[in-house]
Every structure is written in structure tokens, then in C-alpha cells.
Amino acid sequence: MKAIKKIVITGGPCSGKSTMLNLIENTFKEKGYKVLIVSETATELIRGGVSPLGGKENMFIFQDYLLNLQFKKEEVYEKAAKEMDSEKIIILYDRGLLDNKAYVSKEEFEVILDKFGITENELIDRYDLVLHLVTTANGAEEHYTLANNAARSESLEDARQIDELTLNAWVGHPRLRIFDNSTDFEGKVERVLKEIYNDLDEHMPTGTIRKYLVDVENIDIDNIINTSEKMDIVQHYLKSSNPNVERRIRQIGNGENYSYYYTEKERVNNYRTFRKEKKISDKLYLTYLSEIDNQLFTIIKTRHCFVYENQYFKLDVFNNDKKYGILEIEATDQNGKILLPDFLNIKAYVTKDSMYSNYEISKRNYVCK
């Protein structure tokens, strides 16, 4: 039976929403889910020249436009989800319809809802889960920036106020969850993913990734792993002015459809890294190509995602090394035993060996000799 899960990602300005959406998408795509993302309607309108500036009256009109467009977008995505072959579908909403309540008075919002012939409770019932990410202006001020969204211009105090209004707009939803800045961003991501796994009634990996060196020279992977999801990955490392920041772009696809991502990893100390990732257009991807670090090789690999003994594995086979690949599993039990696939020739456990990271491999252009 087809299952469509509808999840709203909301929050204040600079709360990590865009990066979170990309991480959720990538995580659950690899788990076999079809993931659809309904983009933020307000940003679309503002970037398209439809602005709410000019006083309360203009904001009221803007919210009318916004809800009209958002209703239509959600209808299209939900119709598409129902017609897809996939049995497991997640629709991620970059803000839901109730977010708009934060920008007008209660009376004005009721007028807008009356126009569309819908009640607030009916809006609440449209979504299965609402995840509110608290703005970094509240508890992580050092990370507050609007550089990644030209459609926003809030001060720290404004951001805190908008965050509170947005959260209050969703009060009453039975599955509203709040994610503050009591941890670093990686911890925030972990808490969000845990909530989604729980809602999907699936076991969440512990975050402990175990890596193995695999001899792939004499095996026909496509035949022995006949239920895998396969994707092609091209990964370029970019020049960085900060030695503690690793920059990269990725092209991920299946030969027909491709997605593009920009990632920064900042090493805070020997134990912590701070990661930012966002989905980018093909045009921006091409622009970033001019920043490639020519001292590093491009990583070109095919990733095979598969399930073995109720465990989820990813096997990366590199184009520049036909002999060795890297097998990964993110454990669901910190101390649990891993049952390795008996059809693969496992050569070594390399989790703690940094030489087998993609970044290190890009320095030498092979996995292992």
C-alpha cells in the first residue's frame, strides 16, 4: 500500500532550514524513498519581483497571493505523489500554509482563510509532522547570517520575533516538534532525523559509520546486488582560503536526471566538524567548476545502495580504481554486530583510517595499492 508522508520544515531566519532539507532529501533517497520538495513560496515570489514591502496593507495582499500559489503547488505535488510508482514517498514542505499566519493579524488571516473556504484546523490536518528549527539568532548568534538568502533582511532581534511568531502559528498541531540550538548543527540534524525516523516507524542509524575496504576487481556487482539503487557521483574539491574548511561540489544522478550540491565542512577541532550543504542549480554548478582545486583529482564513482540481512549498505566503486571499493554502513545499534555481505570480498576494516576518506583519495587518485 502506498504511503505518503507530509512533513513541514519551518523555523525562523537562518535556522539551517535549507541545509536540513538537503540532508533529509539525501538521507531518505538512499533509504529507497521518493522525496519531493515543495519550495518556499514567499522566496519564489520575492525573487520574482512580487514584494510585500510598503506597509500592512501590502503584506495582507502579499499573503493572499502567497496562499493562492501555495495551495496550487501543494495540490500539484500531492497529485504527482499519488501517481508515482514508488510505494514510499515523503513530501517535504519548505514552510507550510500556516507559516503565513506569522505575518498578518489573527483577524486578517481569518479573512484570507474565509476567501479560500478553509479553516485553520483543516490547514493543520494537511500535514503529518511539523519540524520547527529555532533561528540561530536565539542561542547560536555567532552563526547568524543572511548571506545565503537575498530575500531576507532581518536583524537579530527581528529574527527572534519572527521565529516566535512562526512557532506560535503552528501551535495546535499534534505533531509539532521544536529543535533549538542547544547542540551544534550536527546535533540539530541528528535530532531532526531521529524524529522523522520515528514518524516513519523505522530504526535510526546511530551516526556511527563503519567503513570497509572491498576487493571489487573480479565481481559483477550489478548481478550479485540485483535489488540495489545505483547512482553516479562526480565530486570536485574547490579551492579554499581557510585550511580548516573543505569545499566541494557534487553531481548525483542516474544517467538521466541529475541533482547538484555545494558543501562546506569546517573542522572546529579534532573531534567536531560543522557542515553546510545546499542544493544548487546546474548553472551554479558550472560556475563553481572555475574554482576547482587542480592539485586534487576529481572523484568519480558509482554508489550501490542495498539491504542485506535488514542492514542498509552503500558500496562506492571508483572509476579510477577498478580493484578496490569502499563499503559503508551506518549502524542502528552502537554496539550491535554487523553482518557483512557474504558475497563481497572484504579486505580490511578502515573506519578509523583517514586515508580512505574521499578527500584523501582525491590526493592520490586511487583507493588502495
Image (cartoon, rainbow, N blue to C red):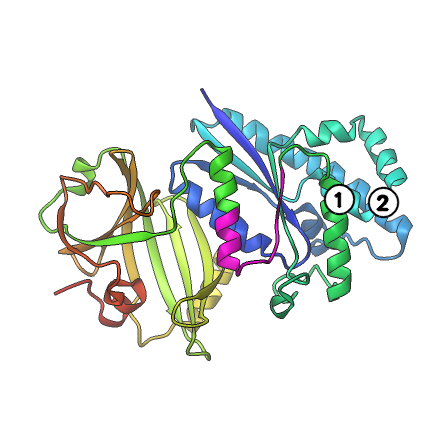
Observer-nearest of 41 and 357: 357
Residue 223 position by quadrant:
top left
What quarter of the picture does the C terminus occupy?
A: bottom left
Determine which of the numbered discs, if any, sits on residue 61 in the image: 2
Q: Is residue 116 above or below residue 250?
A: above
Residue type highlighted by circle 2: Ile
What quarter of the picture does the N terminus occupy?
A: top left
Assign a secondary structure to mark 2.
helix
Question: In the picture provided, is 192 more to the left or to the right than 42?
Answer: left
Q: Is residue 128 above or below residue 144?
A: above
**Mark 2 / mark 1, whichever is N-terminal:** 2
Distance, label 2 to label 1, CA atoms, is 22 Å
- Point 21% across, 37% down: residue: 225
Q: Is residue 212 above or below residue 33?
A: below
Instruction: Give how far across and how far down residue 348 sits, in percent.
Output: 15, 56
- Point 66% across, 44% down: residue: 95
Question: In the picture provided, is 74 more to the left or to the right than 34?
Answer: right
Residue placed under numbered mark 1 in the picture: 168
Q: Which residues are magenta?
A: 176-191
The answer to whether the residue labelled 2 contacts the one labelled 1, judged by CB atoms less than 8 Å apart, is: no
- Point 20% across, 62% down: residue: 367
